Image (cartoon, rainbow, N blue to C red):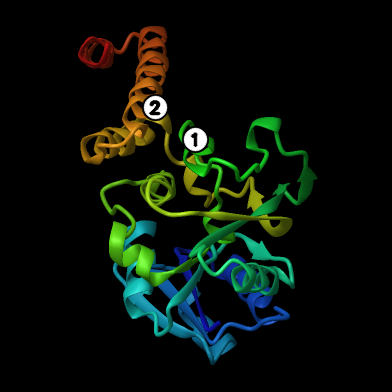
């Protein structure tokens, strides 16, 4: 297997170096590493000097979905592995996934378990984020349980279902994995092969309130495109999220949001 690694980054020069170190110390080395600099104003441009073999692409700031899509469009090889610039890989991450796909040739996407680190300290992962891998669509319907940094995927899937939705500021991974899980097998490598870092101020999820608002956008879009038995599952999940968002709107006396989610609940019940 020949792999392209895609790393989007925005003003994370020091973290990006750590991520790249974890790529170049892999026991199975990728053939191509693409860094998409999404309009950084720090020293990210120096990464091409620090790691001369990296394919460095600069674009004006357009968001993580656009950056990943730029990487996909410029990838030279059929297998793609994503890595967020604030995460890092365990040294045999790619080797373990390559072995998995060589033994399961009908599976064109896989993900792995993970280690969580907050402010430099190892933390226990909540039970609800436990990786099971039996029904990937259902396991990811309430929230995203597949870290982009753990994913290895064949390009043909993306050619079929499309790329990351650039209209979503966050939860773009949640949206894409659900679209894929409706039509393709997704395999789980039951080993902790990535380190997910949290607590730093650059983390995207810290910059957006009400993450479920974006999950609702993804689910509404998915519902319109779905004609399978998943339709009822999506409706049930949407009702749960509308209810929670309305409850939050009531708490903070957001009249417009109260009216919006009241209308949406009536439309789906």
Whether 99 is drawn above or below 179: the answer is: below
Whether 238 is drawn above or below 116: the answer is: above
Quick check: can you spot residue 64? yes
Q: Is residue 168 left or right of residue 192?
A: left
Q: Which mark is residue 171?
A: none
The quarter of the picture where residue 212 lies is top left
Q: Which mark is residue 138?
A: 1
Q: Secondary structure at mark 1?
A: helix
Foreground of the two, 222 or 118: 222
The quarter of the picture where residue 56 lies is bottom left
Please report the residue visible at 35 percent of the width from the left and 36 percent of the height from the top. 214
Residue 134, percent from left and from top: 59, 42
Which residue is tagged 2? 233
Please report the residue visible at 49 percent of the width from the left and 35 percent of the height from the top. 138
User: Could you tell me how many numbered marks the image carries?
Assistant: 2
Residue 215, percent from left and from top: 38, 35
Residue 66, percent from left and from top: 32, 62
The quarter of the picture where residue 235 lies is top left
- What crowding class fits label 1: few (fewer than 14 Cα within 10 Å), some (14-19), or many (20 or more)? some
Residue 99, percent from left and from top: 67, 72
Residues at circles 1 and 2 in contact by the CB criterion of under 8 Å: yes
Please report the residue visible at 38 percent of the width from the left and 13 percent of the height from the top. 243
Q: Is residue 256 left or right of residue 72?
A: left
Foreground of the two, 168 or 164: 164
């Amino acid at each position: 297997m020949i792999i392209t690694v895609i790393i989007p980054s925005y003003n994370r020069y020091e973290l990006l170096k750590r991520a790249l170190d974890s790529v170049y110390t892999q026991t199975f080395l990728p053939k191509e590493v693409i860094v998409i600099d999404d309009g950084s104003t720090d020293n990210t441009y120096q990464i091409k000097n620090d790691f001369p073999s990296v394919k460095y692409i600069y674009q004006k700031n357009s968001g993580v979905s656009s950056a990943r899509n730029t990487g996909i469009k410029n990838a030279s090889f059929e297998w793609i592995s994503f890595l967020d610039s604030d995460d890092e890989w365990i040294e045999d991450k790619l080797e373990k996934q390559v072995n998995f796909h060589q033994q399961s040739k009908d599976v064109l996407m896989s993900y792995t378990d993970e280690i969580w680190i907050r402010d430099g300290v190892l933390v226990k992962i909540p039970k609800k984020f436990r990786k099971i891998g039996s029904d990937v669509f259902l396991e990811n319907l309430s929230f995203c349980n597949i870290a982009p940094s753990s994913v290895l995927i064949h390009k043909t899937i993306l050619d079929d279902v499309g790329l990351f939705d650039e209209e979503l500021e966050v939860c773009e991974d949640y949206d894409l994995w659900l679209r894929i899980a409706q039509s393709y097998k997704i395999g789980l490598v039951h080993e902790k092969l990535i380190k997910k870092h949290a607590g730093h101020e650059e983390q995207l999820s810290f910059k957006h309130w009400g993450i479920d608002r974006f999950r609702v956008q993804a689910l509404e879009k998915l519902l319109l495109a779905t004609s399978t038995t998943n339709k009822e599952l999506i409706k049930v999940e949407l009702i749960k999220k509308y209810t929670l968002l309305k409850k939050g709107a009531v708490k903070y006396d957001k009249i417009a949001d109260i009216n919006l989610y009241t209308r949406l609940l009536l439309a789906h019940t």
